[in-house]
Amino acid sequence: MDHMTVSGDFVAQDYIHLALAIEQHIPGYIDAYYGPPAWRQQAQEAAPQPVANLLKQATDLADAVAADAGMDPQRRDHLAKEVRAMQTALRILDGEELTFVEEVEGLYDITPEWMDEAVFEEAHRTLEDLLPPGDSIQERMIAHRKTTEIAAERAVPLLHEIVTELRRRTQARFPLPAGESFEIQLVKDQPWAAYNWYLGGLYSRVDVNTDLPMHVTDLVYLMAHEGYPGHHTELSIKDARLVQELGYLEFSIAILYAPASFLSEGIATRAQEMILSDDEWVSWHANEILARAGLEHIDAAREHALIEASKHLEAVGGNVAFLLRDRGVSEEEAVAYTQRYALSSEEEARHFMGFLSDRFSCSYIFNYYFGGKMLDALFAARGDREHWFTRLLAEPVTPSQLQVWTAQT
């Protein structure tokens, strides 16, 4: 098939070239690239283009997307929102003063929300009843988390066993392409807990950061989020279906600061529960995982209850981003807020500041909690979670489109 004759292909090529040019100004802007290698090499060898020139190209590209009447509507909507995110990033680079809300809306196609601290305080009250007795709720949480720590060398064989089971469950429910796989690598000095690097050819490398303690009760979630049926699964399916089958070349590149990331994090934060019920999680930990970690004395049912109660604390990160970028608080105040409401140690809170200190990562934080909540709203409104999750894994979808689907009850 000659993809050069397909509507949208020339637009897709311009989109890729523009993204490669923007990356010269924003290191890490491109999360994955598996398009023609020569294009990336040419971009890396070229001198950085003036931001004003790139803004003009982005405007022209937005016009071209809007004018391509022959393009599949979902594909056109996806490209339009991704190009809008490019324009927003370039406006920031150009020195334009955007409010924090305008930045998040432009980059991720969502409106960020401040979470009332009453939500966190209610979670704290639930945790009070679940945690062993002691001093403050924060100190009790920190002390309890230490009891679930596991050394990296002991975690690695467990991670491989967990991946095997998660892959089996994912393959039974979702269209995993034949031949996909990923490897696990331990790393240090990173601002995140784990990261999936999709390398093309249905293959990923999942880096697990050992800077902070690893917890045995986090391992299943971590591998579901990064691998099955999370990031690796989504990118493999989209590569096989959208790039290789349909010729949507724009999906051979993944821009980090764009709406596709919101959907990807929403998918990843709900990945575990798509293939594992609460009872299955408890049983698996009680009968296998905790024993193999040498921690069979831990109560799996209570650990699951603690994890569920703590989920509401995931929104603390968005509030901290608002405090830093919208309300001008100091880093010390942000650290104290994180410790108070997320019940984290000072070390964990300061590590989190490293993530938020990046100009663009600060707004990225909303993708996790609110990405998951947007999927929850879709499932609640439409039912048949596997059907909708499969569509999210396999189709070009924007947050705006997701909200339209949710409203069509």
Image: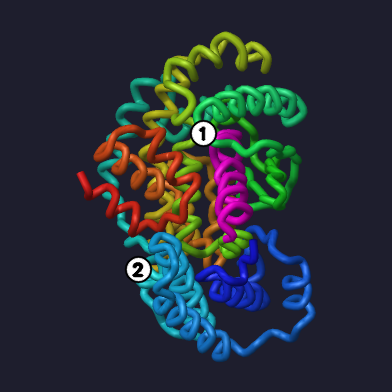
Label 2: how many Cα within 10 Å (few below 14, some 14–19, many 20+): some
Residue 15 appears in the rendering? yes
Q: Name the side, left or right, on which 256 lies relative to 130.
A: right
Residue, disc 2: 101
Where residue 223 sits, quadrant-wise, is: top right
Q: Is residue 319 above or below residue 223?
A: below
Q: Name the side, left or right, on which 75 lies relative to 254.
A: left
> Any magenta on residue 313?
no
Image coordinates for residue 193, horizontal then vertical, percent: 61, 44
* N-terminal label among 1 and 2: 2
Q: Nearer the viewer, mark 1 or mark 2?
A: 1
Main structural element of the magenta stretch: helix, strand or loop?
Answer: helix
Kind of element beneath mark 2: helix
Kind of element beneath mark 1: loop
Image coordinates for residue 310, horizontal then vertical, percent: 40, 34
Identified at 55% across, 29% down, the residue is 170
Q: State which region is magenta.
A: 223-247
Residue, disc 1: 174
